[in-house]
Image (tube, rainbow, N blue to C red):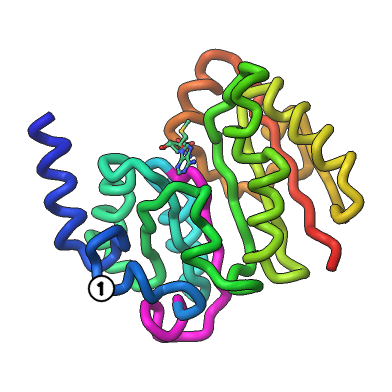
Amino acid sequence: MRSKLKRFAENAEAANVIQPGKPLFDKIKGHWHELYFKNKNPLTVEMACGRGEYTTGLARLFPQRNYVGVDIKGDRIWKGARLARQEGMQNVAFLRILIHHVLDYFAENEVDEIWLTFPDPQPKDRHEKRRLTHPRFLDMYKVILQPDGWLRFKTDNTGLFTYTLEVLQARPDIRDLTYTFDLYESPLQEEHYGITTRYEQMFAAQGEKIKYLKFRFKD
Ligand SMILES: C[S@@+](CC[C@H](N)C(=O)[O-])C[C@H]1O[C@@H](n2cnc3c(N)ncnc32)[C@H](O)[C@@H]1O
């Protein structure tokens, strides 16, 4: 508990954590490039980022792109944000919000790529609306993602993965859907850059195959 409070206090001071009460929080929508990154480089957003392994891992590999990790849990975000500060990464920010409100923080077409990494599977039928690949969330991602942008999704969970494929295949506004039930044995493997998240490591160690898909929206 004490360490959680310490993390929250550090987040409150950190310029790379954007959260309620910070000056940028209410004006960042549509202004990420100008107000935060101070450049026009393409923007990748990692949803449900937890400790932000993709956010920091990709930012290290691609300094000419910008990365924002989104999650509601401040103590998890703290980890990635601290790493980014320690390494002096100027192309990383973390946004602490519920993804339900993502349209209040990114403008139409402001995002060039979305990664969704190991979201909670929410297996109960009555919790379907909480799944971060439910149509209501896809509708939001579609607004903020520019038309050629890819959405990339990684999970260990077969139920969530097949659910997501069904949702996508039923939608008329999806193109270039590509997927694998076993990323590590797939030619698509190179697309994840060997970056593994905390949950990925836990589930891969238990023998779960990592599933991956990507797609774009039609205009
Ligand atoms: C299973 S963890 C995965 C974390 C990380 N991506 C990983 O792979 O290690 C799921 C994360 O999603 C976040 N999350 C779930 N639903 C969310 C929502 N509606 N808005 C924001 N964050 C959410 C949780 O706080 C948690 O950190």
Badge count = 1
Tell me, yes or no, whether the highlighted magenta stretch contains residue 113. no
Q: Nearer the viewer, residue 111 or 139?
A: 139
The kind of residue on which mark 1 rests is Pro
**Residue 110 placement: quadrant:** bottom right
Residue pushed farthest top? Answer: 206
Q: Nearer the viewer, residue 132 or 94?
A: 132
**Residue 214 versus residue 102 in the image, above or below:** above
Residue in the picture at 65% in, 43% down: 153
Percent x, y for residue 159? 70, 21
Query: Considering the numbered disc 1 on the image, is that residue within a helix, a strand or a loop?
Result: loop
First to last magenta residue range: 32-49
Question: Image quadrant for the C terminus?
Answer: bottom right
Q: Nearer the viewer, residue 28 or 180?
A: 28
Disc 1 residue lies near ligand 1 with CB under 8 A: no
Q: Is residue 31 left or right of residue 170?
A: left
Q: Which residue is mark 1?
A: 23
**Residue 52 versus residue 63 in the image, above or below:** above
Q: Nearer the viewer, residue 153 or 210?
A: 153
Residue in the picture at 29% in, 55% down: 81
Residue in the picture at 20% in, 54% down: 11
Residue pushed farthest front? Answer: 126
Percent x, y for residue 12? 17, 57
Q: Is residue 184 left or right of residue 45?
A: right
Circle 1 residues within 10 Å: few <14, some 14–19, many ≥20: few
Q: Is residue 201 left or right of residue 180?
A: left
Residue in the picture at 37% in, 77% down: 36
Q: Is residue 131 left or right of residue 85?
A: right
Percent x, y for residue 136? 67, 46
Tell me, yes or no, whether the highlighted magenta stretch contains residue 39. yes
Question: Image quadrant for the N terminus?
Answer: top left
